[in-house]
Image (cartoon, rainbow, N blue to C red):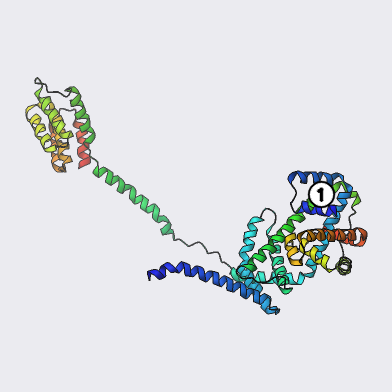
Amino acid sequence: MKYTEIIDKYLDGEMTSQEEVAFEAQAKTDPELAQEIELHQLAIVGIQHGQSARSQEGKARVEALVEGVKAEQKPPRVKPLPPVIPMWRKLLPLAAMLLLIPAIYFITTSFSNPLKSKSIALTEHYQSTTMGGNNPNEPEKTTLLKGINDFEEKDFPTAIISFDQVIEKYPAQRSAALFLKADALYRQGKKADALQVLKSIRQEDDGTLYEEVQAIIEKME
Amino acid sequence: MRILDDLKPLLKHIYTITSLIMNEQKIYELLSSGNYDKENEGMRMLIQDKAYLMQKHGRQMQHYFNDEKKHEIFIESIQTLLEKIRADKFEWRGKNSLEKYLYTLIDGKIKNEIRKIKMKRLVEITKAHENEIATTDKPSPDKKWEKLSQFIREKLGETCEKVLIMRYYEGMQLEEIAKEVGWTHGTTKNNSAGCMSKLKQLIKDNPNLKDYLRGLLQED
């Protein structure tokens, strides 16, 4: 009787972990307890076997009902075949990409200003050589610098007036002034006028801007 | 219209609860009808309605049992529920009482299975004495068992047999057994242990029975 209660306590998980360890240690060494454990196990097997043998028919009945319900709840699922995609549709993204590349090239080249980089170089050059101040000994540079300042402030018509003065009066800075004038016209959207001015540089150039101007004209045409 | 829209969730909730109660009542009526076909219909509704209980338990016991064992526990629990209803051991007391009872039955079966696992472990520990425990051939089915179980029933008495089945087959707690048999907790505890000791003594004294049960254990 005493063993029965202790074994049940162990099986029901009602022992503390220390008690469990002690009980298992005793089971290892105590033959009487070991025999009781075997008898306990056999008794439970007997009770369960007797009961399940008795309810075998009932279980089969419930089993059949469960299977029936499962079959009703889960109609056989046919795995859908992957949709057939025609070859032309598979190639469509690739074709779109191929069309997009020249379009992007066209857009970037059409909207970029071909005169811009040279204009920056010229303005930086003149701003550094005149040190930003008025020099009564070099009035051509002072006028050019004024044009450059207006140009940078995007006051292109005023800038063009200064550039025209330089073009008319000071041949040494004529090419630079022409180039900047062409850019000022270009930025105002007057591409044809800008092209004309550039061509005049090509005709009268002293040689320093010739190749660059030629390349720009080719791009613009 | 706006008021109707606001009331919709509440109405839906009331409808769900009402239909659940009505379902349970209907299931109970069918299961307690004593008619084979009606019982089947009741069990079918029960399985459809309460299958989620098994899923819920399934999550809890996934570390212990495989799907086959979980399925077996569910089947046995429904079978036991039907037997209890037939024997007037279950009384329908309104909302969810059937579900709660089924939950208790499943719970008991799970505890039983866990006990079995622990028992096996304990027996492994006692292997030092295995020379004293003779191995036997598998038992031949199953007229022998009929005789043996008849013998056990006669020796133990009806009450002992019932208590042992509730405790070791249905996995009921002592409190639940006490309620069902009408004993106090202390009496139930003593009687349950007394009945088990009686059965063990019976096995000890009858080598035939002992060998037969050892054979079952090997089969298991």
Q: Position of residue B129 (x, y in %)?
A: 88, 48
Would you call the spot at circle 1 few (<14 residues within 10 Å), some (14-19), or many (20 or more)? some
Q: Is residue A213 above or below residue B52?
A: above
Q: Quadrant of the N terminus of chain A?
A: bottom right
The count of marks equals: 1
Q: Is residue A44 visible?
A: no
Image x and y of residue A155, in percent: 14, 37
For numbered disc 1, what is the local secondary structure?
helix
Residue lying at 89% horizontally and 48% vertically, measured from the top left = A31
Q: Which residue is mark 1?
A: B124
Relative side of A33 to A113, left or right:
right
* Residue depicted at 73% across the width and 65% down the height: B179
Chain letter for the residue marked with disc 1 in the picture: B
In the rendered image, residue A126, in percent from the top left (x then y), is placed at: 18, 26
| In the displayed structure image, the side of residue B128 where residue B170 appears, left or right | left
Residue A66 is left or right of residue A22, and the answer is left
Q: Is residue A137 above or below residue A89?
A: above
Instruction: Inspect the image, locate mark 1, and give the three-letter code of the amino acid beneath it.
Output: Glu
Residue A206, by quadrant, is top left
Looking at the image, residue B189 sits to the left or right of residue A218; the answer is right
Residue at 11%, 32% in the rendered image: A163
- The answer to which of B141 and B175 lies nearer the viewer is B175
Q: Quadrant of residue A57 in the image?
A: bottom right
Q: Is residue B82 visible?
A: yes
Where is B170 relative to A215, above or below? Answer: below
Which image quarter: residue A177?
A: top left
Percent from the top left, x then y, of residue B147? Answer: 89, 69
